[in-house]
Amino acid sequence: MTRTSPTRQKQGGSAATSVAQVRLRPDELADLQRVMQTLKLHSLSDALREGLRLLSREATEVAASQEIRDFYQGAQAPTPEGVLPATADELAAADETEW
């Protein structure tokens, strides 16, 4: 459940901000603290804003890929001129790649 407080003015700017509350399990908080250390994020707010930014980007990519699927109505999208379609082995190798 998200609770918001009355809107406050952001320090040094005119943009309004809201306060949201989130419950984290101990393991999630430990993961978040490790991420904050690794990425040199200075506050929980910075970390959560960065997470929301990444979620927003991913949602935009998912929506774009759905638009492409809808446009081609289930058919394979064409490849650019001079580019060969990936083979089954290349696709399988890509699926097995770990980052």
Image (cartoon, rainbow, N blue to C red):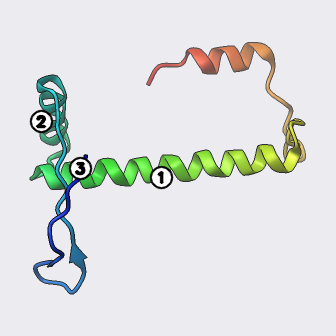
Amino acid type indicated by mark 3: Leu
Where residue 36 appears, as percent x and y from the top left, is 15, 42
Q: Which residue is mark 1?
A: 57
Q: CA distance from mark 3 to mark 2?
A: 11 Å
Q: Position of residue 86 (x, y in %)?
A: 79, 26
Q: Residue at x 64, y 15 (%)?
A: 93
At label 1, which amino acid type do we have? Arg
Q: Which mark is residue 94?
A: none
**Residue 72 lies in what quarter of the image?**
top right
Residue toward you, 16 or 69: 16
Disc 2 from disc 1: Cα separation: 22 Å
Q: Residue at x 17, y 34 (%)?
A: 24
Q: Which residue is mark 3?
A: 48
For mark 1, give the secondary structure.
helix
Q: Nearer the viewer, residue 95 or 4?
A: 4
Closer to the eye: label 3 or 2 = 3
Callout 2: SS: helix
Residue at screen point 13% across, 32% down: 29
* Residue designated by label 2: 33
The quarter holding residue 82 reads: top right
Name the image quarter holding the C terminus.
top left
Determine the CA span between mark 1 and mark 3.
Answer: 14 Å
Mark 2 or mark 1: which comes first in sequence?
2
Q: Which comes sooner in the sequence, label 1 or label 3?
A: 3
Q: Amino acid at mark 2?
A: Gln
Q: Position of residue 67 (x, y in %)?
A: 73, 51
Q: Position of residue 81 (x, y in %)?
A: 90, 47
Counting residues from the N terminus, which is met first, the one under dot 3 or under dot 2?
2
How crowded is the residue under tag 3: few (<14 C-alpha within 10 Å), some, or many (20+)?
some
Secondary structure of the residue carrying tag 3 is: helix
